Amino acid sequence: MTIRAALRTPDVIRQAREHLSRGQLPVDLLDASIGRSWQRCLEHGLLPGTRLELPRLDSGELRLQREAHRRLIELADPLVSRAVEDLRGCQLLLATPDATVLKSYGRDFVIDQRLRIGAGINLDERRFGTNAPALALIEEAPVLVKSCEHLLFPDNPVSCVAAPLFDLDGSCLGLIDLTFEANHPRPEIFLRRVQQLTGALGQRLFMHYYQQRWVLQVHASLAELDGVSCGLVAISDTGFILAVDSQAGRWLGQAAASLTGQPVEALFGSPWPALQRQCERQSALLGLELTGGRLFGRLNPPEQWQPAEVVPVASPPPAAPRLGRQLDDLVADWPPPLAREARRAARALASGLPVLLQGDTGTGKEQLARALHASLGEQRPFVALNCAALPESLIEAELFGYGEGAFTGARKGGYGGRLVQANGGTLLLDEIGDMPLALQARLLRVLQERVVTPLGDHREVPIDCEVIAASHRDLEERVATGDFREDLFYRLAAVVVELPALNEQDGLAARIRERWEALCRAHGRDLTLDDALVERLAGYPWPGNWRELEHCLEAALVGAEPERREVGLEALSPRWQRKLSAGATATDRPPAMSVTTDSPRSCASWSACICCARSTPTAAI
Ligand SMILES: Nc1ncnc2c1ncn2[C@@H]1O[C@H](COP(=O)(O)OP(=O)(O)OP(=O)(O)O)[C@@H](O)[C@H]1O
């Protein structure tokens, strides 16, 4: 039941509403914070269909409110105005700690036919029912409220995310809400975006107070250390902790109040003068060993630290993204429908949608995944995880990471995990069809909530990467047999590219010649393949697909005597001569992709199948 609650799909919420209409509050079907909100609404006598009496401030009252919250507006206005430019089609709200909207930016959404959300409206939960601004204030945390989770508005066309902004003394300054169309496939992107904005504002507040002090940035991920989710600690010249922001409290696993006034040694173990010396006049990167895990730190002398800029994550795709040379080159001589699908996949990935690549072993799934990744910018990390190559007990640690001492044999200092390593880049989940069901549930949750909690650790690490999944199995068939979660399938398969087996390709003889010529160029040889050999090669079933063909051709090329100008059957190894002479018999046909076998590789029956002896790609485990 709790797993279903994490899904938050319209169907599940509809079921929850049906229970409600029968007088039951189905907390098991709801996200925990939404369940609490619905409960409070019921206690206030609010039900779907309740007529709303919503006060809206007149212009004089609104002016007074804006005056009273001038500090919030001065701090947030420049950042929010800039953010709305790359959040076209969305509405941003800046609101007070009692959920009165001070300013609205971008689009003006109208919900429930007549209700325009804008400046002057008050979104208190006791009047408006479940909504993101009210919930973020009550939960004191960033929240997502999906369209139909708004209790009073079952047909709401929008979903909302909101995050509160706290002053350094812990008091609430207000909040930022981001409202967007309900049919967006990845609402978590907006949650991350609104967290970025409040993170950036928190950093600006911190700088305002502590620019003249030493500032230590901390984060569990090196890639995020200079971003808006790092924690900040202000330190006096004499090495005493002056202030700790809420993010640092989270990373350090201690309440800010208990750290303030402590000598910095109590926290990090290293003497303060030694830390100071490491960064005389410039910021210095530190590896910090802490109880409970390892963190990265950057210590900045007074006036050196600058708040992070908000870099849009997965903002809407540019009108026609350039797909990159690697992809263009790869698909140049592909059959046009397949090349079109590959380009469609690249555009989907650029807009933050996951892509699934299906095809038998050796059909080029990893090659295409790398080209798709490169189409988003080659400098970003590419991390591949072979879900079939690891024992079940290790995939979890490898994927999600672990804290120090999480289990016997865990690395000292813990391990960030593949998902964290892929931050800012692309994660390839290879052989996803072989992932155990229990792990599928955990992966689904990570993909939905976009945070990962390493094993044996209490800290949540935000995840921001594009996801490509690949499998030689037919995942829809796995779903039908109950071996693969349907909800995870839909999470991974916004666009599916099916790579055909080599023996299904038209004009195979021509493709073989092209491949041969490319290999000759790569090896600096000038050799032709004789026509009879090409004919035999084109008639062979190629169970290992491109990989097997490539090995066969390369072996023929490098084995050819230097004086040879043409390669025929007699120039191949006896093994290949035998295989090609035997020709393709009916039993030689490779198993169709839809056949599910217990082994991740479907080629066990091939006595001399080259794909079984392949090496694992270097970036994969
Ligand atoms: N369209 C293609 N043209 C030429 N060579 C190709 C093509 N597709 C793949 N290859 C080559 O075939 C080999 C296998 O490709 P890749 O590893 O991407 O396959 P895969 O589908 O991921 O295989 P597996 O499922 O076994 O991991 C690579 O050496 C790649 O360069």
Image (cartoon, helix red, strand yellow):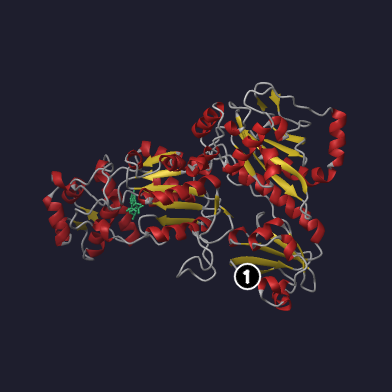
Q: Is residue 483 above or below residue 458?
A: above
Task: Please tell me how many numbered marks the rendered image carries.
Answer: 1
Quarter of the image that includes the C terminus:
bottom left
599 lies left or right of 618: left
Q: Which residue is mark 1?
A: 288
Residue 620 visible here: no
135 lies left or right of 545: right
Q: Is residue 553 above or below residue 237?
A: above
Residue 141 visible here: yes
Q: Position of residue 49 (x, y in %)?
A: 63, 23
213 lies left or right of 358: right
Q: Is residue 151 above or below residue 28?
A: above
Image quadrant assignment for residue 121: top right
Q: Is residue 555 above or below residue 149?
A: below
Of 225 and 379, nearer the camera is 225
Q: Secondary structure at mark 1?
A: strand
Q: Position of residue 135 (x, y in %)?
A: 67, 40
Q: Residue at 46% across / 60% down in the picture?
A: 397
How packed mark 1 is, by other alpha carbons closer than 10 Å (few <14, some 14-19, many 20 or more), is many
Image quadrant assignment for residue 148: top right
Q: Amino acid at mark 1?
A: Leu
Of 384 and 167, nearer the camera is 167
Of 464 and 234, nearer the camera is 234
Q: Residue at 56% across / 28% down in the picture?
A: 23
Q: Residue at 62% across / 44% down in the picture?
A: 191
Q: Position of residue 122 (x, y in %)?
A: 76, 32
Q: Position of residue 387 (x, y in %)?
A: 39, 54
